[in-house]
Each structure stands twice: as C-alpha cells, then as structure tokens.
Amino acid sequence: EAQVTQNPRYLITVTGKKLTVTCSQNMNHEYMSWYRQDPGLGLRQIYYSMNVEVTDKGDVPEGYKVSRKEKRNFPLILESPSPNQTSLYFCASSPIQGFGTDTQYFGPGTRLTVL
Amino acid sequence: AQRVTQPEKLLSVFKGAPVELKCNYSYSGSPELFWYVQYSRQRLQLLLRHISRESIKGFTADLNKGETSFHLKKPFAQEEDSAMYYCALLYNTDKLIFGTGTRLQVFP
C-alpha cells in the first residue's frame, strides 16, 4: 500500500528538549515536504526537499531542521522546541515529474505539544 | 469515519468557462472545511475557508450540510487558475484530512 507514515502521531514534550519526527514514504517519490497546521493560519510549509541531499526552506523554517540522506525518509528535527511550535505537523510526498500538478500524498499528521 | 472525497482527478475547461470542483465530506460533527491550491512548482496555499465566506481570486465555496458538500466554484476560469486543488476537513479541532486533489487545467 502506497503511503506516507509519520511517527510519533502524538507527542508532548518540554521546552528545550530536542526531538525528531520521522517521515517515510514507500512510493519512491523525489519530492517531500513538511507543513504545520495552525488554527486560523491554514497549512504552512516548513521545509521541502526535491531529492536526496537537496533541501530548501519553506515559509516558516525558523526553529526547524531537516535532512534527506535517503529518498524515502525526511525527518523533521526540533533542536530546542518552544511552545510556539505546538502544532499539527504534516509530511507529504509527490513524484518530481508531476510536481505541482500531481497528487501530493500526505501523512496522517503529528500532534506536537511543547510545554 | 471522517472522509473527504474529490471525485474528479482531472478537470479540463477552456478559458472563460465556469468551473466547479467537487468536494464531499463525511463527518457527523460540525465541520470546518478548506480549499487549498498548489500552483506548479509552488507550495501548497490556503485558498479559502468556509467560515470566512469570502471570495478569493474569484473562487467561492458554499458549505451545504444537507448534501455534505463544499464545492469550489468560479464563473469564468482563467489560465492562471490551472493548478492542483485540495479540499480539506478539520475535525475534532486538531485533525485535518485532505481529499486526493483535483487537477484543474484551463486551456486558452
């Protein structure tokens, strides 16, 4: 089954404690992206990656890091989480040749709370 | 179970023609619905929310609870409207699910 998986699905942590949210896709997609969803603000892009070892900032990259060492994985790293990073996070992937015009597959979301 | 259905994967129209992108949802509670758009090689963007009842770029969408629909409409399509459109449902205040998307092609 083609899918994008994220782990963990729910996480409660404290300010300053480093955490990683994993994202994995099994569709051999080149393009992967991280979004955060906040009430009243819609979905905002954090980082995206066009291929292995190629990453770029989205609209709200501050406080986040990503890496793309393998095609299937695109982890989101919060080195020192703060309460304003409490949000719902989505990972997504799509094939590069259809980028922007093809279906983008979204993960189920990760609900992060930073106390 | 909550579900968002966009039955059309591709919708092709000529410039100036009316456009309706269909979205149906399944949710027993009070839904909050969105339309997102992704232009070629750009990030996904929020287009409009049903609670704001606004018109963005000439697009409108009305929530029809009886038909559980939130169709996106525009009376006269423009070439620059060509993009991927996603309908999304927010439920339980923090869970968001997307439809599979509809690609709109507007020919000159």
Image: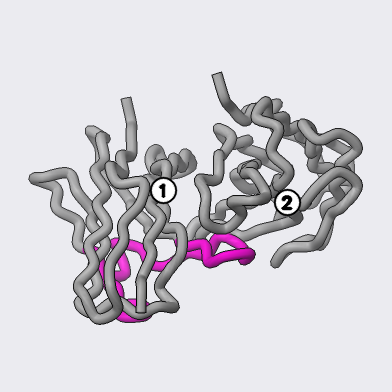
Up/down of A42 relative to B76, above or below: above
> Does residue B54 appear anywhere in the picture?
no
Question: Which residue is label 2 attached to?
Answer: A83
Disc 2 to disc 1: CB gap under 8 Å: no
Question: Between residues B77 and A20, which one lies in front from this camera angle?
Answer: B77
Left or right: A103, with B75 as reference point: right
Q: Is disc 1 on the same chain as disc 2?
A: no
Residue that protrudes farthest toward the left in the picture: B66
Give the residue displayed 57% in from the left and 25% down from the top: A2
Residue stretch rendered in magenta on the structure: B37-61
> What chain is tagged by disc 2?
A
In reply to whether residue B87 is colored magenta, the answer given is: no
Dominant secondary structure of the residues highlighted in magenta in the image: loop
The amino acid type of the residue labelled 2 equals: Pro
Q: Residue B49 falls in which quadrant of the image?
A: bottom left
Measuring from the top left, give residue A61's x and y in whole percent. Answer: 78, 61
Q: Mark 1 highlights which residue?
A: B101
On screen, residue A78 versus residue B98, left or right, reads: right
Callout 1: chain: B
Q: Which residue is drawn at 62% across and 30% down?
A: A4
Q: Would you identify the image quadrant in which residue B16 lies?
A: bottom left
